[in-house]
Image: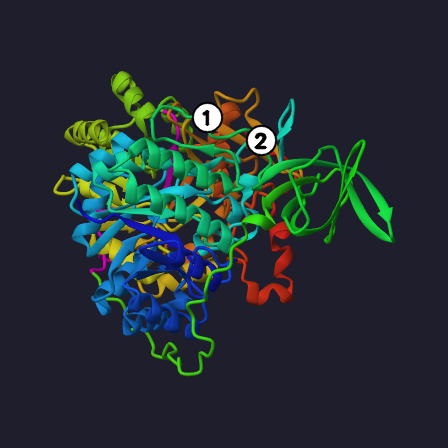
C-alpha cells in the first residue's frame, strides 16, 4: 500500500518543530505576504531558506501557501515571490488565484501547483479541469461526504488532499464575503475577522448562530485511505506548537497502525486527541445529509468551558476572578477569556488558583471583566518542548526575492466589438423562477436566473409559462458545485441548451469541464475572483466572452485591470444584496427566526434554498450612480443582481428606474468600491475606521 502523506500546519518555527518531531511527512507554511493566514507568525525569508534545507535533509516536504488573491498593483511582488520559491525549490505552492496559476504555469513550470481549498473544488469535473491546466493536487472543499470523495477519486487521476482536523468555516470554502463586507478585511486576502464566530441576536435569543464546531475525522481515516486519498491535512496555522504536536501524533499513530489493529489504534488516537482543547467536534458532511454542526449556545472561540466570572475580588492588591466552577485547572495553564459583549478575546496564563466555598478564584493578566466567560485552552502538564530545527544563526541564509518586473500576461483577448455578443444595457439576475415575471417590469436586455437545483426543477415544471424566449435567458450557475450535483446539473444544462439557451455564467472551475465542447457562450462569474489581468487572461483563454468582476473589487483595481482588457468585455454588477455566506446544508430549518442583528445593530437575513443557505445584509450594495463614469471608460453592460431581493411593491421596477437615471441610493453600501481592501500598512492613516465609514446606512431600502 502506498504511503499516505500526513500534512501539518507550520504557522511558526515552533509549530514546525512540533510537526516534524511528531512525524508529519510534510508541512505547509506561509511567508509574510500572499497567504491566507496573515495573522499567524509566518516565516521570514532567511527562516524559510534555512527551514526548507533542514526539511529536505530529513526527507520531508514543504508546501508554501500563496493562496490569496492579488490586485493588479501587486503583480511584480507576486512574480518575485514565485521566482524566489522556484529558485529555492519549494516542493509545491498552494494556490487560489487563477492569476497565480497562469503566472506560475507560464513562467515557473517547475513549481508544483496545489489547488487551495479556497479554489472551491468539490467535484471530479473540477479536479480534471485542474489536471488539464498543470495542477498536481487539489485540496478538496471540506463540505464533501465520504461517498462524494470516493466518487471523485474514481473519476480523476489528480492527487487528492482532504482536511481531517481543525477549525471549519460555516461558509463553503472560498465563498465568504462577510469579513470583507464589514471593512475590507477579506478572507480571500488572508485577513478574515471571523464574522461567523460573532454573537448575533434573533427575535427570540442571542447566540453564535453561524459558529461551526471543529472538524475531527479520526474515525474516517481508515476508510479514506482505502478510498484512495493521498494526503491528510490538519488545519491550524494559527494554533500553538503544543496543539500541532498533539494532533499530529494522534493521526500519525492511526495511519501507522490501523491496518494491523483498527479498533485498538483508533482508541489510542482518540485518547491522544482528548488533549485537543478546541471546540465541540463534528464529522461535518462525512455521512451526507444535513448535519448538526452549529450550536448557538457554544461561544465562537476554542477551549473547554470553565465558567463565567461572577465577581472581581481584590487580594494582595491584585485582581482575582471568581468563577462559578471548581477544579480542573492549575497554575501555568492557559485560558481564553471571551468578553461578555463579544467585543474581544484574550489569552492568558493562570498565575494563581484559590478555592472558595462559592467557587474558584483565579489570577491572570489582561483586560478581563465581570461576566466574561473563561475557557481552558492548554494545561501546563501537557506542554512539551520540541528541539528547534532552524540553526541558531541564520547569517549564511541570504536568499531574497529579486526586484524583477513581471512580464505582461499573454492571452486571447475577446474582440472589442462582437456582433454576436451581448448588447449594451442592463441585465437582471433573479433568484426564483416566479420572479422572471416580476423582472419584466425592469425591461432588462436579458434575464439571468440562478440555476440551482430548486430553480432547475421549477424551470422544467413551469417551462410553458416562462416569459422569456430561451435566447433571452442566461443561466447563472451556482458557485458551489459538489460531486453530488454533477449528474442532474449536466442533464439539465443539456436540456436547456437544446431548447435554445446560449449564454451561461460559470462560477466554479468544474463548470468549464461540464460545458466543454457544448454549444454555449461563457461568461466568467464573480466567484472566479478575477482581481488581476493574469486571472482575466486565464479566463479568456478558457473561452469566456465576458468577465464579471468580484463583488469585493475596488474602483481603483478595476480600472487598472481595464488597462489590459477591452472595457466592453467587462460586465460589472452594479446592484446586489451580496451573498456573505454560502452554506451547504439548511440552517434556516434549525432556527425560529431568519433575521439576525450583530453587535453594531446591522441586520442580516438567512435565505434557505433547501440544499443550502445564503446570508445577505439588509442593505444592498450599489454603484448604479457610477454607471455614467463607467460608460465613459468604455463599459456598456451592467448587471442588476436581484437574486436576494423581494419583488413586492414594484421593487424591481424601482431599481431599474434608479439605474436608468444613475441615481444614488443613500441606503446602500459601496462595499469595497470606494476604499478597497483593508491594508495593515495603511492602518495608521485612518483606514481602521473604514468599515464604519462604509457600513450601510440605517434607513431600510423599500422592498426588502
In terms of depth relative to the viewer, which is nearer, 467 or 352?
Answer: 352
In front: mark 1 or mark 2?
A: 1
Taking the magenta stretch, the answer to whether it contains residue 499 is no
- The residue carrying pointer 1 sits among few (fewer than 14), some (14 to 19) or many (20 or more) residues within 10 Å by Cα, namely some
Query: Can residue 11 be seen from the camera position used here?
Result: yes
Whole-angstrom CA distance, mark 1 to mark 2, is: 35 Å
Task: Left or right? Give the position of 78 relative to 194.
Answer: left
Where residue 678 appears, as percent x and y from the top left, is: 54, 58
Give the labeled residue for mark 1.
292
Q: Residue furthest bottom?
A: 396
Query: Can residue 121 be seen from the camera position used here?
Result: no
Residue at 28%, 21% in the rendered image = 457
- The residue carrying pointer 2 sits among few (fewer than 14), some (14 to 19) or many (20 or more) residues within 10 Å by Cα, namely some
The answer to which image quadrant residue 534 occupies is bottom left
Where residue 698 appears, as percent x and y from the top left, is: 66, 39
Residue at 64%, 46% in the rendered image = 335
Task: Left or right? Give the position of 699 relative to 392.
Answer: right
Query: Helix, strand, or loop for circle 2?
Result: loop
Residue at 18%, 32% in the rendered image = 497
In terms of depth relative to the viewer, which is nearer, 483 or 462?
Answer: 483
Residue at 29%, 32% in the rendered image = 146
Above or below, 222 against 85 in this view is above
Where residue 27 appears, as percent x and y from the top left, is: 36, 57
Where residue 458 appears, as percent x and y from the top left, is: 31, 20
Point out the image quarter for the N terminus.
top left
Taking the magenta stretch, the answer to whether it contains residue 416 is yes
Query: Helix, strand, or loop for circle 1?
Result: loop
In terms of depth relative to the viewer, which is nearer, 334 or 301?
Answer: 334
In terms of depth relative to the viewer, which is nearer, 130 or 413?
Answer: 130
Give the labeled residue for mark 2.
702
* Extent of the magenta region: 412-432
Amino acid at each position: 500500500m502506498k504511503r499516505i502523506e500526513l500534512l501539518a500546519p507550520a504557522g511558526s518555527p515552533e509549530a514546525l518543530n512540533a510537526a516534524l518531531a511528531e512525524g508529519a511527512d510534510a508541512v505547509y507554511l506561509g511567508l509574510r505576504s500572499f497567504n491566507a493566514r496573515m495573522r499567524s507568525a509566518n516565516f521570514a525569508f532567511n527562516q524559510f531558506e534555512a527551514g526548507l534545507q533542514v526539511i529536505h535533509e530529513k526527507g520531508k516536504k514543504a508546501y508554501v501557501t500563496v493562496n490569496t488573491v492579488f490586485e493588479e498593483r501587486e503583480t511584480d511582488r507576486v512574480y518575485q515571490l514565485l521566482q524566489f520559491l522556484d529558485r529555492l525549490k519549494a516542493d509545491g505552492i498552494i494556490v487560489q488565484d487563477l492569476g497565480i496559476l497562469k503566472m506560475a504555469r507560464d513562467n515557473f513550470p517547475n513549481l508544483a501547483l496545489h489547488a487551495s481549498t479556497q479554489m472551491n473544488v468539490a467535484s471530479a469535473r473540477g479536479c480534471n479541469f485542474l489536471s488539464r491546466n498543470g495542477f498536481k493536487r487539489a485540496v478538496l472543499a471540506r463540505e464533501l461526504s465520504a461517498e462524494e470523495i470516493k466518487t471523485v477519486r474514481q473519476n480523476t487521476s489528480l492527487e487528492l488532499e482532504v482536511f481531517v482536523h481543525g477549525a471549519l468555516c460555516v461558509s463553503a470554502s472560498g465563498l465568504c464575503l462577510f469579513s470583507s463586507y464589514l471593512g475590507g478585511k477579506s478572507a480571500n486576502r488572508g485577513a478574515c475577522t471571523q464574522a461567523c464566530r460573532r454573537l448575533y441576536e434573533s427575535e427570540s435569543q442571542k447566540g453564535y448562530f453561524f459558529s461551526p464546531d471543529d472538524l475531527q475525522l479520526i474515525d474516517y481515516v481508515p476508510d479514506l485511505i482505502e478510498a484512495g486519498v493521498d494526503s491528510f491535512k490538519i488545519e491550524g496555522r494559527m494554533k500553538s506548537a503544543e496543539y500541532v504536536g498533539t494532533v499530529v501524533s494522534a493521526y500519525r499513530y492511526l495511519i501507522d497502525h490501523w491496518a494491523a489493529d483498527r479498533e485498538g489504534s483508533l482508541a489510542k488516537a482518540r485518547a491522544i486527541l482528548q488533549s485537543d482543547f478546541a471546540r465541540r467536534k463534528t464529522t461535518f458532511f462525512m455521512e451526507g445529509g444535513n448535519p448538526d454542526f452549529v450550536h448557538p449556545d457554544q461561544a465562537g472561540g476554542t477551549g473547554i468551558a470553565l465558567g463565567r466570572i461572577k465577581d472581581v475580588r481584590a487580594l494582595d492588591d491584585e485582581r482575582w476572578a471568581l468563577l462559578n466552577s471548581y477544579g480542573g485547572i492549575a497554575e501555568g495553564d492557559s485560558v481564553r477569556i471571551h468578553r461578555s459583549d463579544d467585543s474581544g478575546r484574550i489569552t492568558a496564563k493562570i498565575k494563581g488558583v484559590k478555592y472558595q466555598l462559592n467557587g474558584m478564584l483565579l489570577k491572570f493578566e489582561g483586560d478581563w471583566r465581570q461576566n466574561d466567560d473563561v475557557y481552558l485552552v492548554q494545561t501546563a502538564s501537557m506542554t512539551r518542548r520540541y528541539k528547534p530545527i532552524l540553526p541558531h544563526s541564520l547569517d549564511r541564509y541570504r536568499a531574497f526575492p529579486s526586484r524583477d518586473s513581471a512580464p505582461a500576461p499573454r492571452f486571447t483577448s475577446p474582440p472589442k466589438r462582437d456582433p454576436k455578443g451581448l448588447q449594451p444595457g442592463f441585465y437582471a439576475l433573479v433568484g426564483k423562477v416566479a420572479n422572471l415575471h416580476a423582472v419584466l417590469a425592469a425591461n432588462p436586455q436579458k434575464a439571468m436566473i440562478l440555476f440551482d437545483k430548486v430553480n432547475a426543477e421549477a424551470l422544467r415544471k413551469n417551462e410553458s409559462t416562462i416569459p422569456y424566449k430561451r435566447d433571452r435567458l442566461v443561466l447563472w450557475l451556482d458557485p458551489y458545485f459538489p460531486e453530488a450535483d454533477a449528474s442532474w446539473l449536466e442533464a439539465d444544462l443539456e436540456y436547456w441548451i437544446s431548447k435554445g439557451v446560449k449564454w451561461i455564467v460559470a462560477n466554479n472551475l468544474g463548470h468549464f469541464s461540464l460545458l466543454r465542447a457544448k454549444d454555449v457562450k461563457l461568461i466568467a462569474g464573480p466567484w472566479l475572483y478575477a482581481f488581476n489581468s493574469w486571472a482575466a487572461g486565464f479566463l479568456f483563454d478558457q473561452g469566456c466572452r465576458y468577465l464579471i468582476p468580484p463583488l469585493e473589487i475596488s474602483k481603483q483595481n478595476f480600472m487598472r485591470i481595464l488597462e489590459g482588457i477591452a472595457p466592453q468585455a467587462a460586465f460589472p454588477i452594479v446592484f446586489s444584496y451580496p451573498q456573505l455566506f454560502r452554506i451547504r446544508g439548511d440552517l434556516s430549518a434549525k432556527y425560529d427566526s431568519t433575521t439576525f442583528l450583530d453587535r453594531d445593530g446591522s441586520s442580516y437575513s438567512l435565505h434557505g434554498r433547501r440544499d443550502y443557505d445564503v446570508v445577505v445584509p439588509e442593505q444592498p450594495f450599489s454603484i448604479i450612480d457610477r454607471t455614467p463614469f463607467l460608460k465613459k471608460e468604455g463599459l456598456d453592460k451592467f448587471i442588476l443582481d436581484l437574486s436576494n431581493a423581494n419583488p413586492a411593491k414594484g421593487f424591481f421596477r424601482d431599481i431599474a428606474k434608479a439605474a436608468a437615471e444613475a441615481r444614488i441610493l443613500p441606503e446602500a453600501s459601496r462595499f469595497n468600491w470606494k476604499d478597497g481592501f483593508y491594508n495593515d500598512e495603511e492602518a495608521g492613516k485612518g483606514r481602521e475606521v473604514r468599515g464604519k465609514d462604509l457600513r450601510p446606512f440605517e434607513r431600510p431600502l423599500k422592498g426588502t
